[in-house]
Amino acid sequence: MASLKIPAQVPSPSDDSEQLRKAFQGWGTNEGLIISILAHRNAAQRKLIRETYAQTHGEDLLKDLDKELSSDFEKVVLLWTLDPAERDAFLANQATRTSGNLIIAEIASTRSSLDLLKAKQAYHARFKKSLEEDVAQHTSGDIRRLLVPLVGILRYEGDEVNMTLGKSEAKVLHEKIAEKAYNDEDLIRIVTTRSKAQLNATLNHYNNDFGNDIDKDLETGSDDQYLKILRAAIKGLTYPEKYFEELLRLALNKMGTDENALTRVVTTRAEVDLQRIAEEYQKRNSVPLDRAIDNDTSGDYQKILVALLGRDE
Amino acid sequence: MASLKIPAQVPSPSDDSEQLRKAFQGWGTNEGLIISILAHRNAAQRKLIRETYAQTHGEDLLKDLDKELSSDFEKVVLLWTLDPAERDAFLANQATRTSGNLIIAEIASTRSSLDLLKAKQAYHARFKKSLEEDVAQHTSGDIRRLLVPLVGILRYEGDEVNMTLGKSEAKVLHEKIAEKAYNDEDLIRIVTTRSKAQLNATLNHYNNDFGNDIDKDLETGSDDQYLKILRAAIKGLTYPEKYFEELLRLALNKMGTDENALTRVVTTRAEVDLQRIAEEYQKRNSVPLDRAIDNDTSGDYQKILVALLGRDE
């Protein structure tokens, strides 16, 4: 469930656009006003505000936000204001240029087929090339063999499950993992091509027939990046809330918060499942997610994060 | 250019639907009437006829055609009547079940990104799984490594070309081919991920800098299936008319015509570029394509093929 809260009476896009313009004027910027508007509008509403703003003022709202804001607060406002497909395209492109392979795996595994497709189309439109060619160009070896199909393939999204196939492919996965053949091509094929429902059935068979969760069997303690990506992909495909809970836990537990991860999870999930992720977080950490964020962040950055989490101030 | 000819005055879908119903009634089937209607309607018009037929008679036109017709004529009518995306999904599925890897490569390389995407979505709808998972499951080794990204990746379709990249990737391709490393992962990456415009620029550099067409350098005389698929993909991506010309040449030159290939090329290209393919054919074989088809086929099968080629009888 989404965490985003939208008021019962939403002002018109031109009212919102004028208020934002006002927030930029005079000495200093009115960050509170920006949060009170943008952090309470859904993607369709934000899009209309951007369009109205561009028509009225002949300027891109994102460019003006970029000029007015700074540091972590700027990053979260810009990411949030983007359309989800444009945002994913932007994050993925940044990741290809900074070896952010785990972020590529996250986007590819936790989005629906349609959302991933839209992100790839937004990537074409913005970068004049495909996400796949950039991922393939900036990776090699096993990581490329895993990541390119993970990003490329249009997974079937129906609920139909073939239990016989699930049982036989669970056996394949178990054999390969027992042999430490983590880069086996059938293992990669199963993870990258099967529907989420089918993969889930397979991993249930794995658990039932071999006594361990696959994630546990892949936990080798090694720092191998390929294995990290493989685990992230499997978790993202089958238990996205747990995947994001873990990401937040690590981002907030660190000496020095990982603001990039925190910003990314909150902006990309607030309209999707951030409420569920917050429930998982509280269950696993015995502290509510918004309180953990309060402890680790401050100022306008903190305010917009908890607003996107749906907390009323 | 498409070869399909549509009359200036197209009857209404309900008139067409009634005429088809009449063609099925009484003793024997009126094949000529079926050809005169279906072989002169585009995909949107055929779709409306199918819908009207189903509404009026409570039956699927395709099922009735299946009951009334037989052998090669039946196959061509059914394939042609299908919506292009459904037809590609059907052909691709058949190919996965019959090791038709060259047909998979043909569909993946000669369709536009959008048409390939629609075919994959039609595949989901009809077969309740993805084309990619079927291709991956039914292949292995080098063929899988080439075919899965070839099918999976949503290529960028713009005209933008990076000439520096083209030059450097041409060098990579030439080195790998000189070493006979045809399964090299960078070679596969370049062929499967780059836009058609970019790949074309790269292959022009290849030709200019190393003196040979890449297709020539890949012509090893060996019967290796991987190499055949690689050559088909490269040709299909960069010179689809030449790819289809060659396919028709081989289909018609054989002792015993290859009706499957002939039917596939005519039905899948009649609304796309069959006129250009026919020009290539005549240039290369010094005989018009329709005359070559006349020589090798007969009866209603011949009649519908030349009708789809746009020849007036």
Image (cartoon, coloured by chain):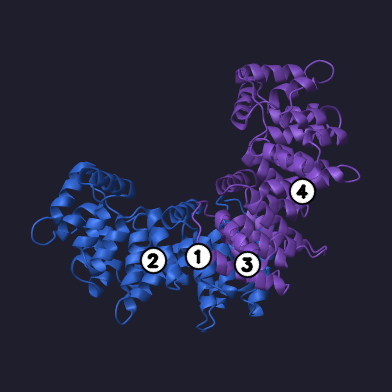
Chain colours: A purple, B blue
Label 1 resides on the chain identified as B
Q: State the image quarter where residue B146 is shown.
A: bottom right
Residue A162 picture location, percent across and down? 50, 61
Which numbered disc, 2 or 4, marks the residue closer to the eye? 4
Confirm or deny contact between disc 1 and disc 3 (CB under 8 A): no
Q: Which quadrant holds the C terminus of chain B?
A: bottom left
Residue at x-position 70% and y-position 34%: A80
Q: Which residue is under mark 1? A: B134
For disc 4, the neighbor class at 10 Å (few under 14, some 14 to 19, many from 20) is some
Closer to the camera in the image, A16 or B173: A16
Query: Residue at left 63%, top 25%?
Result: A49
Q: Is residue A19 left or right of residue A303?
A: left
Question: In the displayed structure, would residue B288 be above or below residue B257?
Answer: above
Measured Cα–Cα span from mark 1 to mark 3: 25 Å
Q: Amino acid at mark 3?
A: Asp
Question: Which residue does the numbered mark 4 point to in the structure image?
Answer: A246
The dot on residue B98 is none
